[in-house]
Each structure stands twice: as C-alpha cells, then as structure tokens.
Amino acid sequence: MRKRLKKNFTLIAFLLLVNVVGFLSAQAYFSGAKGSSTFSTQVLLESISFNPKMIAPAKWLELGIDLLKKNR
C-alpha cells in the first residue's frame, strides 16, 4: 500500500517537473520571437470552439483524483 502511494507521488512529481521544464523552455524560446507582444484572444476562442472534445482543467483534476482513489 505504502509502496503504491510512493509510486503515485513519484509519478506526479515527475510529471510536474516535466511540465515546469517544458514551460520554462517554451518561455525562453518564444521570448526571442519577433512579432506582436499581445496575444489575440480570438485565436484562443476559435481553437476551443472547433474542438468539442476539449475538457476543462477542472475536469482533468477530477479525473486524476478519481484515479488516485481507485488505486487505494
């Protein structure tokens, strides 16, 4: 039981680390890009409206918590 919990926390920590490293590398890459300094919200709204399978972040969190509960 304790081994499985440790494994889950290790996996979560690894995924969080990968996310942070990816964010920082993307920020560094795009900071040197030339172009408009403002982000068009119209592009974001269009990308969401064309993808009906997109799930809100709160739903992803709920799914993750459910998976952790099932592993207990």
Image (spheres, rainbow, N blue to C red):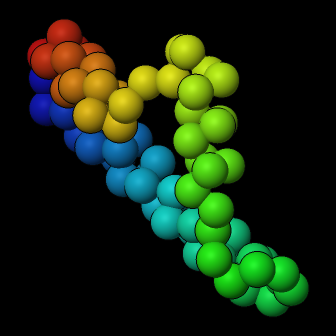
The quadrant the C terminus occupies is top left
The residue under the point 62% across, 21% down is 51
Indicate the position of residue 50 as horizontal and vertical percent values.
Answer: 65, 23
Q: Which of these two is toward me, 61 or 67?
A: 61
List the single residue furthest toward the front.
42
In the image, residue 34 above or below residue 41: below
| Image quarter of residue 71 | top left
Indicate the position of residue 17 as horizontal and vertical percent values.
Answer: 47, 61
The residue under the point 86% across, 85% down is 34
Tell me if residue 68 can be seen.
Answer: no
Would you say 20 lies left or right of 72 here?
right
Would you say 61 lies left or right of 53 here?
left
The quadrant the N terminus occupies is top left
The residue under the point 81% across, 89% down is 32
The residue under the point 35% across, 44% down is 12
Tell me if residue 52 can be seen.
Answer: yes
Q: Which of these two is toward me, 33 or 5?
A: 33
Q: Which of these two is toward me, 62 or 54?
A: 54
In the image, residue 56 above or below residue 14: above
Would you say 16 lies left or right of 49 here?
left
Q: How many marks?
A: 0
Indicate the position of residue 44 as horizontal and vertical percent values.
Answer: 60, 47
List the single residue furthest toward the top.
70
In the image, residue 26 above or below residue 18: below
